[in-house]
């Protein structure tokens, strides 16, 4: 049975962490990205990092929910 996945994103001024979590609360995968803080990086990098994270997560299927 396929489980729903949920994507959590912790965007900071030096790095961004993303985690995919299954319905049971266990981490399925995680990754580390460039900074995501708008005041530090501006709109172009913010957009690029979010796009990259969503593409990475999409490799597992469409997340049922996203928290930033």
Image (tube, grey):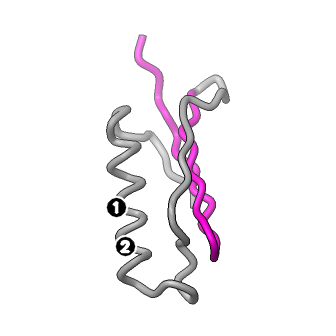
> Does residue 31 appear to the left or right of 61 in the view shown?
right
Residue lying at the far top of the rendered structure: 1
Mark 2 surroundings: few (<14), some (14-19) or many (≥20) residues within 10 A: few
**Do the CB atoms of the residues marked 2 and 1 lie less than 8 Å apart?**
yes
Q: Residue at x 58, y 50 (%)?
A: 8
Mark 1 surroundings: few (<14), some (14-19) or many (≥20) residues within 10 A: few
SS for callout 2: helix
SS for callout 1: helix
Q: Residue at x 38, y 45 (%)?
A: 56
Expressed as whole percent of the image width and height from the top left, the position of residue 20 reads 54, 39
- For marks 2 and 1, give the CA distance: 6 Å
Q: Residue at x 35, y 39 (%)?
A: 62
> Does residue 44 appear to the left or right of 7 in the view shown?
left
Residue 5 magenta: yes
Depth check, front residue: 22 or 14:
14
Q: Residue at x 44, y 40 (%)?
A: 64
The magenta stretch is 1-22
Say the numbered circle drawn on residue 62.
Answer: none
To which residue does mark 2 refer?
47
- Prevalent SS, magenta region: strand
To which residue does mark 1 refer?
51
């Amino acid at each position: 049975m396929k489980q729903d996945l949920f994507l959590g994103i912790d965007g900071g001024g030096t790095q961004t962490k993303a985690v995919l979590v299954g319905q049971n609360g266990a981490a399925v995968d995680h990754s580390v990205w460039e900074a995501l803080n708008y005041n530090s990086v501006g709109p172009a990098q913010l957009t690029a990092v979010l796009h990259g994270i969503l593409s990475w997560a999409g490799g597992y299927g469409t997340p049922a929910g996203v928290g930033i």
